[in-house]
Image (cartoon, rainbow, N blue to C red):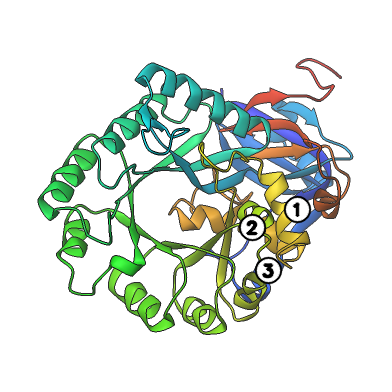
């Protein structure tokens, strides 16, 4: 017997359905909202999406567990592509202390549970280097692999550390890449765009290791950015929000998704206008909390959406797209996650809101009423209970 679940009667169902690629331009403003919508889930996958009247009349839906979500907003789970972790406790910047592996494991599980409770169902975890290139990055990735995809999906990335502008020894990088691939510890590698050369042997190593590439760009010569994008063909680029108009044009013409941290701009009082400029130029945007255990402890993507609207001049629709489907494509998992479409994994949030446009207006409240992962209700703050009428 198939496992069936019917989410019935959402006031607003944000499907984000569309072309199977990252959303740009007018597409980034379209949430494909269904008023009074429902979702039928079969064996962890979305079987049907549409109006409540149509789904209620389906024979298969009559055998499903009925979960009424009247008066709520239903949407895809948030995707946070830029969380940074470290095995070192750097409260003493001069003498960072390495954490016990078990302590790191327990802290990381607690962090992932907090993410789930606030609506993040997929997190990109980057192993942040300390004091340049260190073997502790592999140990960190081993612990994250041990946690796996419970309580949230995790996409693991290795961030290569340059020290004093110098690239780590290529032999050491190659050895680490071999370990990461052999034990499936990471699927992405992050490079500093300022350190990249088009003829770099490092790019050949990454290609041979079949690793996806992301770039870290902190602003400078737009020609240098263009060369780095052409050389590495990255899935995404982590950017500051004070990009020049020339940098925005370069990113808009590329196939890469630009990822921004809204929380950092609030702390640093940065203008952040380049996000809107990039969006208007047809660029692909994604948002991240930028969580860093040492400096930025925010992991609430509801807060990120609000900041993107209030501080970075994005529309609510653009901010939601940037924190769901675009963030998923930035980590190369958009074919499975980020929108509510037939055959995709059922990774769904039920928000205690009657209009999605209220999300940035109600700060300080966790609106998550229910979380569904792979068709299973894993968090329930609503009044609904199994067997209830």
The quadrant of the image that shows the C terminus is top right
Direction from residue 288 to residue 387 in the image, left or right: right
Q: Nearer the viewer, mark 3 or mark 2?
A: 2
261 vs 338, nearest the viewer? 261
Q: Nearer the viewer, mark 1 or mark 2?
A: 2
From the viewer's perspective, is residue 68 above or below residue 126?
above
For the residues labelled 3 and 2, say whether their Cβ atoms are less than 8 Å apart.
no
Residue 31 at least partly seen: no
How far separated are the C-alphas under marks 1 and 2?
A: 17 Å
What is the secondary structure assignment of the residue under circle 2? helix
Q: Residue furthest left?
A: 171
What is the secondary structure assignment of the residue under circle 3? loop
For the residues labelled 1 and 3, say whether their Cβ atoms are less than 8 Å apart.
no
The quadrant of the image that shows the N terminus is top right
Q: Which residue is mark 2?
A: 268
Q: Nearer the viewer, mark 1 or mark 3?
A: 3
287 vs 247, nearest the viewer? 247
Q: Residue furthest front?
A: 94
Q: Which residue is mark 3?
A: 271
From the viewer's perspective, is residue 326 above or below residue 299?
below
Image location (x, y in percent) of residue 72: 84, 40
Residue 85 at least partly seen: yes
Image location (x, y in percent) of residue 362: 85, 46
Image location (x, y in percent) of residue 29: 71, 68
Image location (x, y in percent) of residue 177: 20, 46
Q: Which residue is mark 1?
A: 306
Direction from residue 127 to residue 77 in the image, left or right: right
Residue shown at the point (74%, 68%) measured from the top left: 313
Residue shown at the point (70%, 65%) measured from the top left: 312
How far separated are the C-alphas under marks 3 and 2?
A: 9 Å
Characterize the local packing of mark 1: few (<14), some (14-19) or many (20 or more) Cα atoms within 10 angstroms.
Answer: many
How far separated are the C-alphas under marks 1 and 3?
A: 16 Å
């Amino acid at each position: 017997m198939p496992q069936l679940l019917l989410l019935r009667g959402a006031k607003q169902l944000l499907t984000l359905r569309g072309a199977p690629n990252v959303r740009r331009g007018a597409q980034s403003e379209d949430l494909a909202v269904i008023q009074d919508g429902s979702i039928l889930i079969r064996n962890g996958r979305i079987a049907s999406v549409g109006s409540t009247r149509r789904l209620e009349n389906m024979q298969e839906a009559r055998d499903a567990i009925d979960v009424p979500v009247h008066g709520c907003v239903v949407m895809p789970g948030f995707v946070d592509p830029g969380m940074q972790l470290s095995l070192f406790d750097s409260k003493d910047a001069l003498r960072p202390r390495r954490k016990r592996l078990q302590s790191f494991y327990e802290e990381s599980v607690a962090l992932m549970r907090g993410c789930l409770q606030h609506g993040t169902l997929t997190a990109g975890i980057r192993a942040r280097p300390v004091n340049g290139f260190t073997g502790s990055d592999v140990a960190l990735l081993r612990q994250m692999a041990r946690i796996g995809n419970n309580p949230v999906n995790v996409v693991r990335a290795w961030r290569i550390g340059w020290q004093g502008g110098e690239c780590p020894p290529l032999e050491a990088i190659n050895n680490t890449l071999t370990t990461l691939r052999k034990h499936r510890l990471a699927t992405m590698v992050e490079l500093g765009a300022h350190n990249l050369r088009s003829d770099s042997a490092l790019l050949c190593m990454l290609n041979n290791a079949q690793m996806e590439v992301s770039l870290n760009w902190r602003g400078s010569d737009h020609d240098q950015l263009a060369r780095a994008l052409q050389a590495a063909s990255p899935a995404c680029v982590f950017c500051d929000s004070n990009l020049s108009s020339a940098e925005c044009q370069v990113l808009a013409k590329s196939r890469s998704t630009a990822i921004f941290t809204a929380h950092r701009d609030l702390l640093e009082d940065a203008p952040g206008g380049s996000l809107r400029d990039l969006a208007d130029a047809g660029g692909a945007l994604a948002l991240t909390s930028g969580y860093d255990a040492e400096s930025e402890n925010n992991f609430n993507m509801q807060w990120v959406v609000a900041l993107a609207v209030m501080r970075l001049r994005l529309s609510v629709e653009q901010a939601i797209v940037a924190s769901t489907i675009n963030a998923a494509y930035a980590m190369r998992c958009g074919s499975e996650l980020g929108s509510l479409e037939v055959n995709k994994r059922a990774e769904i949030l039920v928000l205690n809101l009657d209009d999605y446009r209220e999300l940035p207006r109600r700060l300080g409240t966790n609106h998550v009423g229910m979380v569904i992962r792979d068709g299973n209700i894993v968090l329930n703050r609503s009044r609904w209970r199994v067997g209830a009428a």
